[in-house]
Image (cartoon, rainbow, N blue to C red):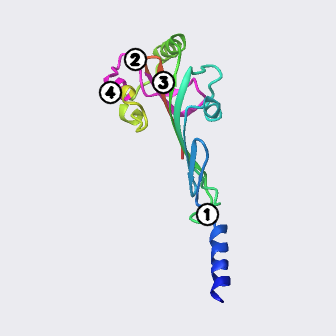
Amino acid sequence: MKIVPLLTLILFLYSCEQPSNKEDKDTITKKNISTTLSTDTSILSKLIDITNHKPTKAKFKYVFIDNSGQDDRITVPGPSDSRLEAILYLDSTTIEAIRCKYNIASYTANYEKMRFNFEWLDKSIKDELSKNDTTYKHDLPDNFFGTGQSGRLWLLNNKVLLIKSTN
């Protein structure tokens, strides 16, 4: 009979344990790392400025590493890290205006395609990126979506691939 209270106590303690993974519709959190894969431009608008160059649609992956010290693995808090990978579908007028401004400017392009070959991109986009020539400047600092020097753009046909990193 003493085993029943013991089992009850064990079950109670086990049921109170909080899972280490939290999920919502688009975000998965494991310990201090949150990963969002979404097409919701209202979420994207909190990460970059899309007010002047609103995409017709978008898909993005955002990884946030919380180094604030709220996790047991971090003994000394530090700045948090994040990485945004996005594809923004733009109308032809907007993409041509962006191309025109970059062609006028004296930016040095890097042409590092592989860093824009996001694992989650559709095969058709990956194919377009691999076949993309260097007629236009590519892998440029972002002056259109508010990421400044922490952001880079690769221009495709009516699409922009965007990377933004902080660390």
Is 73 in front, or is 89?
Answer: 89
Give the CA separation, mark 2 to mark 1: 45 Å
What range is drawn magenta here? 126-155
Give the CA separation, mark 3 to mark 4: 14 Å
Could you say which disc has been placed on residue 136 in the image? 2
- In the image, what residue type sits under mark 2? Tyr
Is 131 in front, or is 20?
Answer: 20
Numbered disc in front, either 3 or 2? 3
Give the CA separation, mark 3 to mark 2: 12 Å
Residue 18: x and y, percent?
A: 63, 63
**Residue 76 quadrant:** bottom right
Which sits earlier in the primary sequence, circle 3 or circle 4?
A: 4
Is 8 in front, or is 152?
Answer: 8
Q: Which residue is mark 4?
A: 130
Q: Is residue 132 visible?
A: yes
**Residue 123 quadrant:** top left
Q: Is residue 165 visible?
A: no
Give the residue at x 54% y 27%.
Answer: 58
Residue 143 falls inside the magenta stretch: yes
Numbered disc 2: secondary structure: loop
Q: Which residue is mark 3?
A: 160
Q: Viewed as shown, does residue 62 lie left or right of 69?
A: left
Q: Which residue is mark 1?
A: 76
Could you say which disc has been placed on residue 117 in the image? none
